[in-house]
Image (spheres, helix red, strand yellow):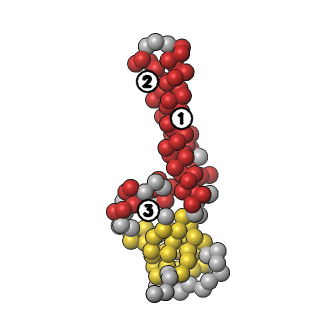
Amino acid sequence: MSHEGVVQSVQGTDVWVKMTVSSACAGCHAKAVCGAAESADKMVQARNVTGETFEVGEKVRVQLRQTIATRAVVLGYLVPTVVLLGVFCLMYLVSSNELLNVGVALAALALYYFFLWLSRKRVAKNVTFVVSKMPQI
């Protein structure tokens, strides 16, 4: 996942980039982690890992590392699906009341998302954007 942006400030290895986000972000897998989805302008802090020099006003490319995007998909889609189906199946073995089974499964899913929300700061620490120069044509 990558976006084009304009450098707003440079502070050591941190580069603040202003991005104008297109509507294509709405379909992105990592929009919950990225935070750039469905907003016109977004300011992100990206890391300069290449050691290149960036100037204020320069057009750059900001990328989310693939491992982070994959982790976001796992936390946002795969784990909740497993929790929902797993709890429903376990409840089906315990009770034949389908309404109760669905209710408990949804409650477990809500509990999962609540704990994910509580750990949002820890998850956000692992999200790093990387800035790079735009390719020359």
* Left/right of residue 131 with respect to residue 101 in the rendered view: right
* Left/right of residue 21 with respect to residue 81 in the rendered view: left
Q: Is residue 8 above or below residue 74?
A: below
> Residue 30's mark?
none
Disc 3 residue type (three-letter):
Ala
Tell which tag, 2 or 1, sits nearer the viewer: 1
Label 3 to label 1: alpha-carbon separation = 27 Å
Q: Is residue 93 above or below residue 81?
A: above
Q: Would residue 107 be seen by someone viewing this image from the given angle?
A: no
Q: Is residue 110 above or below residue 28?
A: above
User: Mark 2 falls on what kind of element?
Assistant: helix
Disc 1 residue type (three-letter):
Val
Q: Which residue is mark 1?
A: 82
Marks 3 and 2, the one that precedes in the sequence:
3
Q: Position of residue 80 (x, y in %)?
A: 51, 38
Considering depth in this image, is 98 or 126 the residue closer to the camera? 98
Quarter of the image where one finds residue 102: top left
Q: Which residue is mark 3?
A: 36
Give the crowd class for mark 1: few <14, some 14-19, many >=20 residues within 10 Å: few
Numbered disc total: 3
Q: Is residue 87 above or below residue 50?
A: above
Label 3 to label 2: alpha-carbon separation = 33 Å
Disc 2 residue type (three-letter):
Val
Question: Residue lying farthest front?
Answer: 137
Considering depth in this image, is 31 or 43 the residue closer to the camera? 31
Tell which tag, 3 or 1, sits nearer the viewer: 1
Q: Which residue is mark 2?
A: 102
User: Mark 1 falls on what kind of element?
Assistant: helix
User: Mark 3 falls on what kind of element?
Assistant: loop
